[in-house]
Amino acid sequence: MLRTEKVLQLRGQQGRAVRVVREHYLRPDVPCRSALCRSAQCRAAYGKLLSDDVTHYVVPDCKVVQEYLEILEFPELKGIIFMQTACQAVQHQKGRRQYNKLRNLLKDPRHDCTVFANEFHQHCYLPREKGESMEKWQTRNIYNAAAWYHNHCLGQMPVVMVTEDEDAIRQYRNETEGVFVISFKNYLDNFWPDLKAAHELFDSIVQARRERESESQENHGKEYPEHLPVEVLEAGIKSGRYLQGALNVNKHRAQLEAFVRLQGVGSKDTELQSDILIYGTKARNRAIHGDVVVVELLPMHEWKGRTVALCENETEDKAPADTTGDPMPTGKVVGIIQKNWRDYVVTFPSKEESQSQGRNAQKVLVTPWDYRIPKIRISTQQAEALQEYRVVVRIDSWESTSLYPNGHFVRVLGRIGDLEGEIAAILVENSICAAPFSEIQMSEMPVSSPKNPWKVSPEEAKKRLDLRDTHLIFSIDPKGCEDVDDALSVRTLPNGNLELGVHIADVTHFVAANSYTDVEARARATTYYLADRRYDMLPSVLSADLCSLLSGVDRYAVSVLWELEKESLETLRVQYTRTLIRSAYKLEYETAQALLDGDTSVVGDILELKGLEEGARQKKLAELVWAISKLTDIARHVRAKRDRCGALELEGIEIRVQLDDKRNIHDLIPKQPLEVHETVAECMILANHWVAKRISEDFPHQALLRQHPPPRQEFFTELRECASAKGFSIDTRSNKALAESLDRANDPSDPIVNKLLRSMATHAMSNALYFSTGSCPEEQFHHYGLALEKYTHFTSPIRRYADIVVHRLLMAATLRGTTGDVKDNIISNKDLEELCRHINNRNRAAQRAQKQSTELFQCMYFRDRAESDERELRGRWDHLLHPHQRFSLLCCRYGIKGAAYMKNKEGLVISCQGAGSCQWKPGSLHRSQHKITSTTTTGDSMTLSLFDHITVRILVQSSRCHAETIKLEIIRNAPHHTVDTEAAQRSLHVVKSELVKEVSQSAEEAQRAQDRARVEVMDEESREFCQTKGPSLYQLLEEIRELALLDVTEDIRT
């Protein structure tokens, strides 16, 4: 090994230039990662091996990797060797996002490429000569490594180095036989003449670069001020003059409003308690939604307020004075720390718009699908052909001399309005990869087919606790569920106590750490559920078969078993272990609820009971009903304990798209809340909580947990104001105070008010996040919504990568001292922090994609219905009104939340007389705290108060450039009553919160009784937690299905 020195010019986290001198060691045994190499050391090295069935290897230089990486991502291009020199150039000059793309490409087994650490190889590394430019040294180093690579493979494979440096082409093209040095364009022309998409993308990138260069030479006028140097920004942040945060553009007022949420304030404390308003595009100074920016506060007399739009005019450049809120901290962007540019879905202008854009037809302003992104200027000759398509573009630069950023065309997604094209747009906008799993990933999967089914290994069975003959295990899942990753059991122990079991699919048995399947699962991070489809995190042979806890088959599981005291149901002992299980039943939620309610007519729906004799069927049915009832008792007890600590009952809306046989939209169905939903949810929450305690005890600095920070108090302002309109006082000082206040906020004459207040409380919540226990103090571990000190995700490893990490941590904790490979399951705190950030980002993308796909299907549903029967559409709608900056409406039946305007674009105000229809007339609006009054010039007035019920017309607003949206138009200031809604109003005298309160009170009474007597026997009613003897909760919720809201099992904040 040789020792030398290397001088690096790097940039720190804040962007400051740093000169670093490092010891540099060179060795002769750096693995080449080629399948042609016969060296055992090279072939044994971890990572992908370059294929030996290609015609040549290609080595791109630094410039090619930086400028044309998206072409190198084409799977048709094989045998690519990325030199370490080129990779480091991308890292230091193109930023984190581009470098991460390169890293992901190298990890992806679908792409035949590898990285060669040429700067650590003693025969490949060349020190930089005095006076030599960095670019020349990089090219010389890469060529030298390419020549060595060819000789190392004994000349078996030609090596083609591609570069944009003409001097290098002239100097090296004939220097080494078998090593060819050509330009990237010549490479595509000669080796890939039929790869049309690559040629089009190359032309687009080159044309965009030329346009940027010519524009910078022609334009000397500044449209925006220059960004301050990094050194000035760093000093300003430390002194407190500047503030740093992420830019969030208001999609409803994209031309006017953006907000910066502070990430840190340097050495000086700040008195700011809110976001910073960035008003107008000039103050935004070329920052794009998602960028990490540095802002300077304006003087207080220049501060502005948020826009409170009461009129239907989103595109106006100036907001009237009476539509703005109180002044808030306002600033301007003076620099960008990190550009978070990505792929953008755009639409080309129509023929009429193209003619109005100017003389140069090759320069086109395209409109992004996302309202928050500015128009992008690209150069292309295909504008006319692509007018009816959604396409993908990338931003290259945004100079201070240009009103718009410059970019280039990447690829076509599909026609505007076509379902598959719109779904593809949603995936691209959320950076979701929907590619099929690769052959190398599938080769890691166990064999399982009808002819050769997978079987339990006898050796593995000996290592596990066998529960197949001792436990009645069953799953309860939605109808049609394939990825069953959890099952439950409960039984009476010989000593009379109860044993509760939560059994989770042992995914980590099949997915080894750092395997190809594991790397892909980590990149996806989660299964993506859209309205009509899903994109799995794991191959289906695992998610729908070997790791799915289906009934009647043997499966590997990780189980948590609690011994509970038979009367108080308090935990006496807990065990974590790998098990072998056989689920007896795969139940649907509705079937389990019916059995819980004593309805045995659903027995015919239980496949596992069919074909049995009557006596045997009745015996098994009785065992199953007892188990479901006992699980429900335990869940009520666990929930009551959390309620006493301040657990919140949050509300949301979830809509399921019902498709017919031809995959047309038949209906939009709100999810019905059942008590058995909460039974399953409480068992899962209990398991997650106990696993979190165990792994954080064993690995206090390297455990993956989930925290839910307390919301900022200013986010509750709207909730408190709206509640005061009905005479309720909401205490938001703690989660317990908030939960109790929401329980008291019931209006007997309008039960929907409580649902809406809970929905507003949900909206005020911060998102729960994954974190590493070594990254924050223990007092910040708390989960606000669940009222638990420690929490994690353990129960869904089929669809969440976080759960896979937790499974590995749990097994490492339980096997500590008994095996030598425990360290393989542990991730360092630094790496775990980075992984948590990635998973959190992917989870947010999954939530956005699910929401956007649901909105897409809502628009398709209402567009079709409006065409068939507009009268029926109008008559079915009963809405609840509440103000949130704009007038907002809520309809639980179809999951619609949207705005309705009191003033239209023409300046007319709405006017309704009595319960009659509404009309647009000249007039004005007056807003008070809890109502808005519309007054016409003729003296007619109409007042809409907070929580009024009104009738609206549902319209679908189409757009060439953006996603379709639901538009609500007020047509009558009175509700439209139907038989269903009147029945629901009559049945709401008992609500869910009352049952929870009753359970909590009963649990407290039982605890006091136990402390007094210890041996006092509680009667049957007490053991059932004093549940009412009237209609069951399920029957009540069935009657109010039009008001059904999201159950806790799917709440994104858990």
Image (spheres, helix red, strand yellow):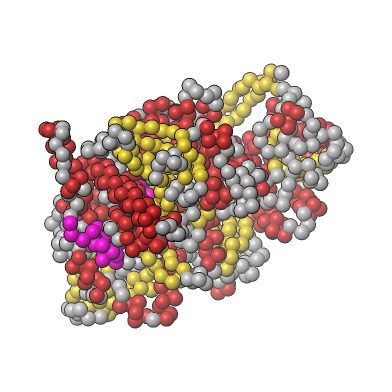
In this rendering, position of residue 754 left or right of residue 15: left
Closer to the camera, 85 or 765? 765
At 26% from the left and 65% from the top, the residue drawn is 1040
Is 1033 in the magenta? yes
Picture coordinates of residue 326, whole percent (x, y) = 25, 53
At 85% from the left and 38% from the top, the residue drawn is 156
Closer to the camera, 905 or 526? 526
Q: Tell me the quarter of the picture where residue 1035 sits.
A: bottom left
The magenta segment is: 1029-1054
The C terminus lies in quadrant:
top left
Picture coordinates of residue 355, whole percent (x, y) = 58, 72
Q: Tell me the quarter of the picture where residue 858 sits.
A: bottom left
Closer to the camera, 1025 or 319? 1025
Residue 569 can be seen, yes or no: yes
The N terminus lies in quadrant:
top right
Is 624 in the magenta? no
Q: In this picture, is 445 found above or below 479?
A: above
Closer to the camera, 504 or 222? 504
Picture coordinates of residue 978, whole percent (x, y) = 25, 75
At 64% from the left and 52% from the top, the residue drawn is 451
Picture coordinates of residue 602, whole percent (x, y) = 36, 62
Q: In this picture, is 338 found above or below 149?
A: below
At 54% from the left and 29% from the top, the residue drawn is 824
Residue 320 can be seen, yes or no: no
Q: In this picture, is 787 found above or below 615?
A: above
